[in-house]
Amino acid sequence: MPSVDPNYDAVIIGGGFYGSAIAVYLTKQRGLKRIMLVERACLA
């Protein structure tokens, strides 16, 4: 498991269609640069 950097602008849990769409929205519309997208398989 990769190390976790606590300095993120947003954390999204769920990397399916909606999670990915939210990440794109936050990047393009809100200007956030550091977004962590966590997939369920990585939590186990």
Image (cartoon, helix red, strand yellow):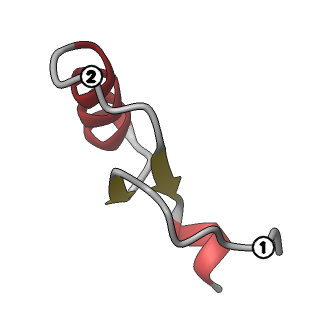
Residue extending furthest toward the front: 7
Quadrant position of residue 18? top left
Q: Is residue 20 above or below residue 28?
A: below
Please tell me which residue is depicted at 67% across the width and 72% down the height of the picture.
4
User: Foreground residue, 42 or 4?
Assistant: 4
Q: Is residue 30 above or below residue 8?
A: above
Where is residue 37 drawn, in percent x and y? 48, 51
Residue extending furthest toward the left: 29
Q: Is residue 22 above or below residue 14?
A: above
Please tell me which residue is depicted at 49% across the width and 53% down the height of the picture.
36
Asked if disc 1 and disc 2 are in contact, CB closer than 8 Å, the reply is no
Q: Say what secondary structure mark 2 lies in.
A: loop
Q: Say what secondary structure mark 1 lies in.
A: loop
Q: Is residue 36 above or below residue 30?
A: below
Where is residue 42 drawn, in percent x and y? 66, 71
Of labels 1 and 2, earlier in sequence is 1
Where is residue 26 drawn, in percent x and y? 24, 30
> Around disc 1, counting alpha carbons within 10 Å, would you say few (fewer than 14), some (14 to 19), or many (20 or more)?
few
- In front of the other: label 1 or label 2? 2
What amino acid is labelled 1 in the image? Ser
Residue placed under numbered mark 2 in the picture: 31
Could you tell me how far apart the alpha carbons at marks 1 and 2 are, in whole angstroms?
Answer: 24 Å
Residue extending furthest toward the top: 28
Residue placed under numbered mark 1 in the picture: 3
Please tell me which residue is depicted at 38% across the width and 33% down the height of the picture.
20
Which numbered dot is residue 34?
none
Where is residue 9 drawn, in percent x and y? 34, 51
> Around disc 2, counting alpha carbons within 10 Å, would you say few (fewer than 14), some (14 to 19), or many (20 or more)?
few
Please tell me which residue is depicted at 40% across the width and 43% down the height of the picture.
16
Horizontal side of 14 relative to 37 (left or right) equals: left
What amino acid is labelled 2 in the image? Gly
Horizontal side of 35 relative to 4 (left or right) equals: left
